[in-house]
Amino acid sequence: MLMLRHFCILCIAACSFWSAMIGLLLVACSGGGSGGGGSGSDTEGTVKLFLGKVQVPMFDSISVDVSSADMASIHVSKKTLDENLKIEGIPPGETRKFEVKIYADSGVLVQKGEAIADIKAGESITIPINLKALVGFLRLEVPLGFNNNTGVSSGKLYLDDLEFDMKIENGKGVFTTGSLPLDKDFNMRIELKDDNGEILFTGSKNVSLSSISQTETMQSQSTRGSVILELSASSAGSSQGVVTLPTNSRPPKNYGDVFFTEIFADPKTSGNEFEYLEIYNATLDTLKLSSCRIARDRNTTANTYKFDMPDNLILPPMEFLFFGRDSVKNANFNYKGLTLANTGQSLGIFCDKAVIDSIYFSKAENFPLKTGTAMQLPLENYEKRALGSSWCLGFSPGEDAVCQ
């Protein structure tokens, strides 16, 4: 979803949470290091501002203009948003006008806002700037599962006479549009096809991107059942949708239906009570895990080498399950029995007699084992998860890997 980063402008670099409003914190810095962060080299009575690192998806650049009748206009812009935007030498005074503009889609102005403020030397004030969306964007995700049992291999999104192809990314089909006008009705239609070009799923709905939050639903016809599209728009004029395809409820039966995504084998704390594991459902089905166990090998009977999943445990499609030993907080459930070897071992997921996933991790195989840090698999490395180089260090139980 396209949203705005909340910008903090300070005498030091900073940034905060996503928001549809920009907050400018202005610190008037006088000479001699007074006035909230100035240094002895500051120009007497000027304002020195920093815009913290900006991370706004789909955005090309951002610009800030400062103007007033009694001062020369100041214009600062950034084409890359991974560095601090710095503004120096703003004279204190009345009716300083601040304009912020956000560009995206190869230079299209997508949002802008302005505010007036009086700035006095040695004073800190916060100026809220509401940004108005000028155009909108649409992103539509179609969860397919890593095994893609639906058979979908391509897709088209139609908005009136506009046409967009689907890309498959990490078990999802993704449609993204260029900039679209706001408050205009579009006839939206999707088609999802198999390898032979046959349409598996299709549906249509009239939609409109607006600066006012909204929710749309679409019922699609399918040769396999029904499809629901849930579409919502943010106050920034962007919209995100998710298509839910028909699913089943079943035990895991195929290799790769579920796989390991995080292993914490060597906690800093003495003993094994803080060890934990994480697994991921790579299918579109709700998986029943009551017939499954985690073990060092298929036939082991020793309690310290395995544990059984509890009755009635289910794992929703394309979600994580985080479980750990007795002392692990916020786990989906706590298990007893299995202990993990600090230097590496074999580990598998077994359901009835089927091997659903297996891994052999060790430093000799280049797996990133380190005391006090978990080992994680980013979902994009799903097909190469047997390689140690596909894993990284970090903690992110319950979500995709955030590598250190």
Image (spheres, helix red, strand yellow):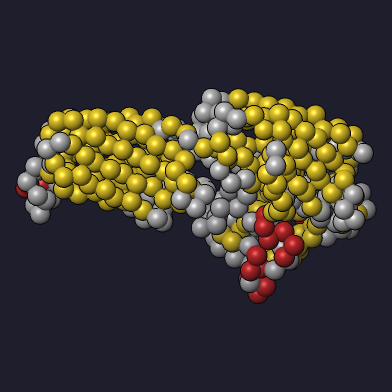
In this view, 113 is above or below 354: above
Q: Is residue 323 visible?
A: no
Q: Quadrant of residue 344?
A: bottom right
For residue 352, side relative to residue 73 (left or right): right
Q: Which residue: 43% across, 32% down? A: 132
Q: Which residue: 59% across, 61% down? A: 392
In the image, 276 versus 395, the foreground residue is 395
For residue 277, side relative to residue 271 (left or right): right
In the image, 238 versus 279, the foreground residue is 238
For residue 100, side relative to residue 286 (left or right): left
In the image, 292 versus 114, the foreground residue is 114
Q: Position of residue 347 (x, y in %)?
A: 76, 59
Q: Position of residue 222 (x, y in %)?
A: 88, 37
In this view, 298 is above or below 186: below
Q: Is residue 331 visible?
A: yes
For residue 343, side relative to residue 132 (left or right): right
Q: How many marks?
A: 0
Question: Quarter of the image containing the N terminus?
Answer: top right
Q: Which residue: 90% across, 34% down? A: 225
Q: Position of residue 111 (x, y in %)?
A: 44, 38
- Single out the residue that lies furthest toward the bottom: 364
Q: Position of residue 391 (x, y in %)?
A: 63, 62
In the image, 24 versus 186, the foreground residue is 186
Q: Which residue: 41% across, 33% down? A: 131
